[in-house]
Image (tube, helix red, strand yellow):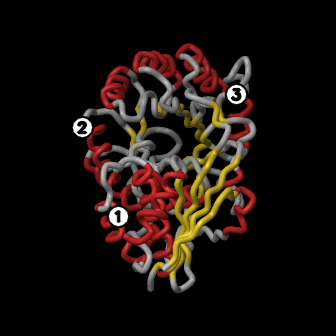
Amino acid sequence: MQVTEIRGYELGFAPEPAIGNARTFIRRRDFLLLEIVTDQGVSGWGEVFSSPFAASALIQKRLAASVLGQSPLEYGRIWHQLVANLAYDRRGPAMMAISAIDMALHDAAARIQGRSVAAMLGGALRDKVLTYASGPFLAEAADPYGHYPAAVEAALRQGFRAIKPRAGLDPRADGAMARDLRTRFGPELGLMVDINQGYTVGAAIDAGRRMAEADLLWIEEPVQPEDIQGYAAVAAAVPVAISGGEALGSLASFRDFLAARTFSILQPDLTVCGGYTGYLRIAALADAHDLPIMPHAFGTIVNHRAALQAAALTASRRGGGPMPYPFMEYDISNNPLIEMAGRMGLSPDGTMAIPDAPGTGLDLTAERFAPWVTASWRCAV
């Protein structure tokens, strides 16, 4: 068996309303979905959400030749071969391109074997995972946090038991927002905040201390993603777990952050860190430091389903909240690309079932996302 074709689909949409965080209002979301097709007619899917256009070009011009004609069952060898061919770009679009390839190869290999990705990689440790609402987001309004109580109440009605609103407006407003949500919704709500790299170190410390009264599970990405000293300073000064890592694309970068005592929770993204192969290497590093790790996922249904398989493989750690870690992220913005295969429902306990169907359990065809395609291409044997 061999890979006979690689198909790329560049797609995107304009979220309505715009997605507000501490740095910007996101008015356009673009992605690359990668389909790897085998001579048996089996397809596997991967995704790039951060630098889709650069990754698209790299796959077509540089990486496809190392994948076409190869057996998808040899995803490990192919990953190492692709990484060995990199030059300076080991944490950016090239690794994102490799991530999409690795995700798609795993999906195809598991489908060929009639097993889920988690089963193929040694067996799932769980069949469900607590899923938190990623949102609400800052609004373009006089009070950017004013709609948060209503949005959280709506998420709770959908079955979520944990919520991750965006913060980073200013430290005083952050503290007031977090304390208000805790007061309104009580001690049982799992509550964490995401600052999206928006603060200087001093402001992050100030905001973290003010929000600590709200009994947060974690504060995510308080400063710039490569600021190791900044993360260390925040972690030492704030009595709340600090999480991050979604923007880190190599094992070495996670090693350096952990050596500096920065993260209490690791959050690699499969579309950034090297796919399943990269994620499992980072998970071993987390195990060595006895730290929780959970996949970041804020894109399309492809990464979401892949992250569920990764969560199934992730060791449990007790970090507080309704259940032991890992938790699973679910984008509650107006995102049609996470629901194009149907919305996955939550159980009454706030968990989402982890599919045990072949691959990631996602039966996807290009027709499902045709309304959002802006360009497509193919590379073939």
Q: Check contact, mark 1 vs mark 3: CB within 8 A.
A: no
* Structural crowding at the residue carrying mark 1, measured as other residues with C-alpha within 10 Å and reported as few (<14), some (14–19) or many (≥20): many
Q: Quadrant of the N terminus?
A: bottom left
Q: Residue at x 63, y 45 (%)?
A: 29
Mark nearer the N terminus (2 vs 3): 3
Residue wearing tag 1: 82
Q: Is residue 165 left or right of residue 325?
A: right
Q: Amino acid at mark 1?
A: Leu
* Disc 3: which residue: 139
Disc 2 target residue? 259
Q: Which of the two labelled residues, at mark 2 and mark 1, occupies the earlier sequence position? A: 1
Q: How many labels sit on residues? A: 3
Q: Residue at x 44, y 71 (%)?
A: 119
Local SS, label 3: loop
Element under disc 2? helix
Mark 2 vs mark 1: give the one in front: 1
Tags 2 and 3 in contact by the CB under 8 Å rule? Answer: no
Q: Which of the two discs, 1 and 3, labels the residue nearer the N terminus? A: 1
Q: CA distance from mark 2 to mark 3?
A: 37 Å
Residue 299 at what x, y percent from top left? 59, 50
Q: Nearer the viewer, residue 286 or 4?
A: 4
